[in-house]
Amino acid sequence: MECFDVGQDGFHGFLHTPAADSDRATRFAGKALIVMGGSEGNENIPRDLGARFAHEGVTALGLCYWNAPGLPRELVEVPVESVERAAGLLRSRGFERIGVYGISKGGELALLAASLMPDISCAVALSPLDHVMPGITGSGSLLSKGVAARSSWTWRDEPLPCVPGGMRLPYASIVLRSLRGRQLDMRFVYERMLGGATEQSAIKVELIRGPVLLVSPARDSMWPSDEACRRIELRLRAHSHPWEVERLSYGHASHIIVPMDTGMLKLFREERQFPRECAASREAAFGCVLDFLERWR
């Protein structure tokens, strides 16, 4: 594993390469994937899931985009250019095709980055939303967090238009709904925010220059990624997207649909009631991602 930091390299990440003698590496020759986690803001997904991809033969650059040395301490006005710099590193290493993979907030970023950067020619988004959302203040527990009045992202030093924010999280309602449903339930918060969404805040997924894979649970209690994925697919098809578009939905699954235990699975009722089925869904989705990456041309 090769490590990169903002001061020296312009981004914070981990490059995982398949073993030189791996038969699987030839399956993805010339391709590399930038892997991003969500609003948890730690290194677990970039580091551990990146290693899993490399084990399967995919060169993966796990990227942290906030809450790391040299990066914003809150998920507010985070520069998208860290993805661009990571892609530049991969291009300098000789990779002809560079894709992005992200879950949750990282899924939003994956779609956004792919829509902005010609060098990115494949996007895989797990449990994403389809609009640029307002930033998230705080970096600790849920009680420390709020919804910023400013955008989550900037591009070329300008904040990207976003869904209206600037609100305190309704903690009492979140706790009450979570207790009644016996799971973390913040979907209603994001549904309210998305009520103010406009075409200006929509991620222009039709500008992505390559195939797009969307993955979500059948119903997401964290935020309405299931509905967002349907809208993204419809938008791409309405624009006659010339590359492959695939949308996968899993009945036994939660918001966290990556093939690893992030420590959050127990927060979701589906994961507690159907642990084997949810684990099978995570692995099945990962297998579909690998097949999708193999088809990517």
Image (cartoon, grey):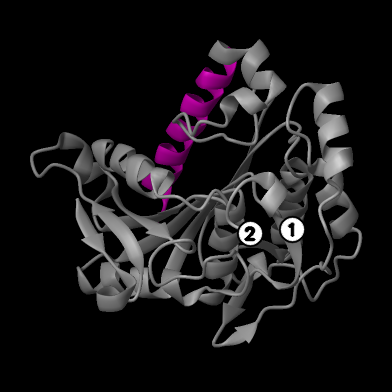
Q: Position of residue 244 (x, y in %)?
A: 55, 52
Residue at image point 9% right, 45% down: 20
Q: Position of residue 215 (x, y in %)?
A: 61, 40
Determine crowd level at label 2: few under 14, some 14-19, many 20+ residues with C-alpha closer than 10 A.
Answer: some
Q: Residue furthest front?
A: 144
Give the extent of the magenta segment: 277-297
Horizontal relation, residue 202 to residue 106: left or right = right
Q: Tell me which numbered mark, 1 or 2, is placed earlier along the sequence.
A: 2
Which mark, residue 138?
Answer: 2
Q: Position of residue 216 (x, y in %)?
A: 65, 38
Work out whether 263 lies above or below 134. above
Q: Which residue carries the number 1 mark?
A: 146
- Residue 292 lies in magenta, yes or no? yes
Q: Amino acid at mark 1?
A: Gly
- Residue 87 lies in magenta, yes or no? no
Horizontal relation, residue 219 to residue 198: left or right = left
Q: Secondary structure at mark 1?
A: strand
Q: Residue furthest left?
A: 21
Q: Is residue 246 visible?
A: yes
Q: Secondary structure at mark 2?
A: loop
Q: Main secondary structure of the magenta part?
A: helix
Query: Looking at the image, do the residues carrying marks 1 and 2 touch, with CB atoms under 8 Å apart?
Result: yes
Work out whether 174 lies above or below 46. above
Quarter in which the C terminus is drawn: bottom left
